[in-house]
């Protein structure tokens, strides 16, 4: 888990901040709801799925309009306890 936090902290992309917040939230939920220890968790799965698309229009020349599709996404992280073997 500390390795994932370090990678996200030093990533240059803006979306790394969103992934970092999601990871911290998932760890906090596991600690609070399932009485697990945050340092003893591992990342099991990470997904970024397509979310709903907001459809808007932009005015153009001569009374026309063009479509604007504002795309969204669903981010999800699944955590699991570390195996005792590793």
Image (spheres, rainbow, N blue to C red):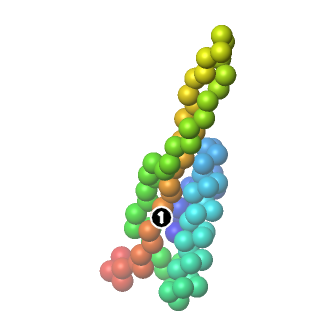
Identified at 60% across, 70% down, the residue is 25
Residue 19 appears left or right of 82: right
Q: Give x and y (percent) for residue 63.
A: 65, 15
Q: Quadrant of residue 29?
A: bottom right
Identified at 63% across, 62% down, the residue is 21
Q: Which residue is mark 1?
A: 77
72 over 32 or under it: above or below:
above
Give the residue at the far bottom of this rendering.
35
| Residue 1 in view | yes
Residue 85 appears left or right of 10: left
Give the residue at the far top of this rendering.
62
Q: Secondary structure at mark 1?
A: strand
Q: Give x and y (percent) for residue 79.
A: 45, 72
Q: Nearer the viewer, residue 18 or 64?
A: 64
Crowding around mark 1 (Cα neighbors within 10 Å: few <14, some 14 to 19, many 20+) is some
**Quadrant where the C terminus is found in the figure:** bottom left
Q: Give x and y (percent) for residue 80.
A: 42, 75
Residue 59 appears left or right of 72: right
| Residue 37 in view | no
Query: Number of labelled discs?
Result: 1
Q: Quadrant of residue 42?
A: bottom left
Give the residue at the far front of this rendering.
63
Q: Nearer the viewer, residue 39 or 75?
A: 75
Identified at 60% across, 77% down, the residue is 28
Identified at 56% across, 38% down, the residue is 55
Q: Give x and y (percent) for residue 8.
A: 59, 55
Q: Nearer the viewer, residue 19 or 51?
A: 51
10 over 58 or under it: above or below:
below
50 over 67 or under it: above or below:
below
């Amino acid at each position: 888990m500390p390795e994932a936090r370090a990678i996200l902290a030093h990533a240059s992309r803006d979306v790394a901040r969103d992934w970092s917040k999601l990871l911290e939230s998932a760890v906090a939920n596991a600690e609070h709801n399932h009485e697990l220890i945050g340092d003893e968790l591992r990342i099991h799965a990470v997904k970024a799925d397509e979310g709903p698309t907001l459809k808007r229009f932009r005015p153009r020349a001569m009374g026309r309009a063009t479509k604007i599709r504002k795309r969204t996404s669903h981010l999800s992280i699944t955590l699991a306890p570390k195996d005792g073997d590793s």
